[in-house]
Image (tube, rainbow, N blue to C red):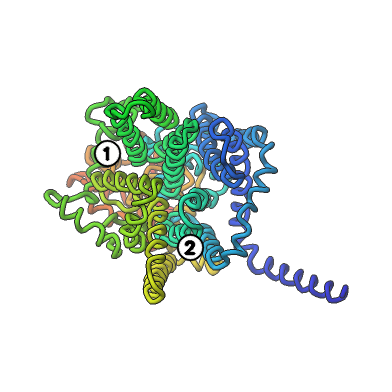
Amino acid sequence: MIPALLYSAALLCLGLVQAARYFLPVFAPALQSSALLVVVVLLCTGTGRLALRYLVTHELSESEKTLIGCTLGLGILTQGMFALGIAGVLHLWSVIALLGGLWIVGFTEMKDVIVSLGANRNLLKERPPWTIGILALLAATFFVSWVPPHQYDSLVYHLPLAAEYARTGRIAPVEGLLFSHFPQNGEMLFTAALVLKSELLAQLFSWFAAALSLLWVFEMGKREIPLTAVLGACALLASHTAVMLLSSIAYVETIVMLWVTGAVLSFGRWRETAVAGRSPAGWLILSAIFAGFALGTKYYAGICVAALGGLLAWRLLVAAYDKRGQGALAPAEAFRDLLLFGATAGLVASPWLLKNLYFVGNPVFPFLYQYFPHRDVAWAGENARRYFEFLTEYGHQPGHFFSDLLKFPFEAATGSLRFGGGMDVLGDMGWGLVFGLLPAGVWAAMRNRTLRLLLIYAGLHIGAWFCTGVVLRFLVVIAPILCLLGAAGAFKVWDSLEEDGRKVLAAALTVLTVVNLGVFIYVHTVFNSWTVLFGVESKDEYLAHRLDYYACARWAREHLGNNDRILIVGEQRGYYVQQVHSITTPMAPNRFIEWANQAKDSTGLARLLMTEGRFTHVIMVPREAKRLAQYGIFDFTPEGTKNWKDMDGRWIRSLFATGHCTLYQLASPDAEAPSPPAPATR
């Protein structure tokens, strides 16, 4: 017995040694980031659970307390990061102190948190196919979140804003980035990750938000519909292609999704307690807090605040005109609830609005830029105008609103990619099963009060979303609500069918799910994710293939000083340039073009670049510049074109070049020009 046991242990050690030898060098950064995620999440959860005691204290299981507490705790972390940034002390020591403060506040909850993690462990024995399938889907998205950040918006503003805040230690407008005036609770989590020296942690925050959203569906859904239907909703959400893709990258959609899901489902619990005659204030405040966190992450989450506020306003109208007499809801109580919700949501979202009011003069910039004053940001009004012009390609063409409305369900369900260009197509995928089950969800909601509320909310949200544009990525935030409705509908249809009919329904659900997963695998194959995940390519090799400018950015990082300033011509994804830099953007005037047009000759242009812009180097990215040119951003005059071309060889000299980018050094016209160095190539 003992020799056999020792032999087995030796084999296990051999396996671990081999695994460490082959895979540890590849996975070490990701494993470190994953461990960091666990630590941060535990600290947030303890504080969140403690805060929850002041809002809801009855009829909560330990697993629900941990789920809601964790969702609250992440929001508390964003507010703490905002406070550090506004105070100008956003540094490693202060972030560690903030996390330490969360530990001090919530450490008494740690034992209960750990115990609560095993609350649903029996599912693995009772429903093994469902449980294993859902966990496998979550594991798949967790694994691909280890791919180095390379998606467009991640590198245009989500991570660059966070990197700038981490570099300067404060929150302030970033030149050339209109997005620095948007709400940024999501970017606060990304900033925490970058301050802690882990850009993969930023992507893991997105994944974790999606996983928490799934837990909200499970914990709240099992109170309303059968367990099989709830597990189906979780599987539907976990296999939704757009959710899988967006949960593995540094976008904020899944973070907004988490707080919108928490807001809507908490609102549903509040309605239940209101009907039962118990004090509903805690759940209503909780709903408002989550709605405020969502609005403080993305402006379009205002739909959530407006929709839930609209339902409360309707309740007030019904109370005001209800003639039933004694026992009816008092208008004063209904008004109190509406005021409480609106005030709480507004207060939670207000830090970013007040920040805009201070820096720009318009609390909702770039919205209403025609009516509010703006100050202290170059080209503020021009930035806003160009931003909205840029978004018109996603809107409805004149006279086509109603025809688009009729075609939308079919086009979205069949996988049309017209609902967002570029990397926004990631949000277009995987809607077939969700929209296909929606009619069944309507049927299921007819006799279930909570499901009816979710259906009404989904209708209001989709209606508002459709009127403001048709970027499906922005609709991902209500995917959990739609999945819960769809799964409830599918279960009702299943229950009404005979054996042969159930086989047909099972085949339909299987085909659509396999298609969703196939598209997910296809997209990551197009991205070549597997080569870097399994160590076939290093991070640098992978990013050099994905981003034309990366090789020049890497050369600059290794050979130039931190005080150098770089002008990037033809690229707006400047995240991997370590030095202070200015990007080329279609959403604002590009100063180097204005300087070229106003200079008398190339000498004058060089002087402007070095004195006005204080640039020392230039990175040229021709292929991406050609793509961006379709937005009319290179509006040189004939004189400006000549001035720019005459710079080459006189005032700019190549230091490093590849087939896709060139790094130049600027030479001052006021100093004797040095001999041009031989350019490095790769």
Question: Residue placed at 72% from the left, 68% from the top?
Answer: 16
- Report x, y in % for residue 128: 58, 66
User: Residue 98 in the image: x percent, y percent?
Assistant: 60, 34
Q: Nearer the viewer, mark 1 or mark 2?
A: 2
Residue 423, position in %: x, y? 35, 56
Quadrant position of residue 511: bottom left
Q: Horizontal placement of 628 versus 682: left or right?
A: left
Pick out the residue farthest to the right: 2
| Image quarter of residue 378 | top left
Query: The N terminus appears in which quarter of the rendering?
Result: bottom right
| Tag 1 secondary structure | helix
Q: Does 452 sit above or below residue 23?
A: above
Residue at image position (61%, 34%) is 50
Image point 34% across, 49% down: which residue? 455
Which element carries disc 2, helix, strand or loop?
Answer: helix
Residue 601 horizontal side relative to residue 24, left or right: left
Residue at far left of view: 399
Disc 1 target residue: 595
Residue at the spot of label 2: 542
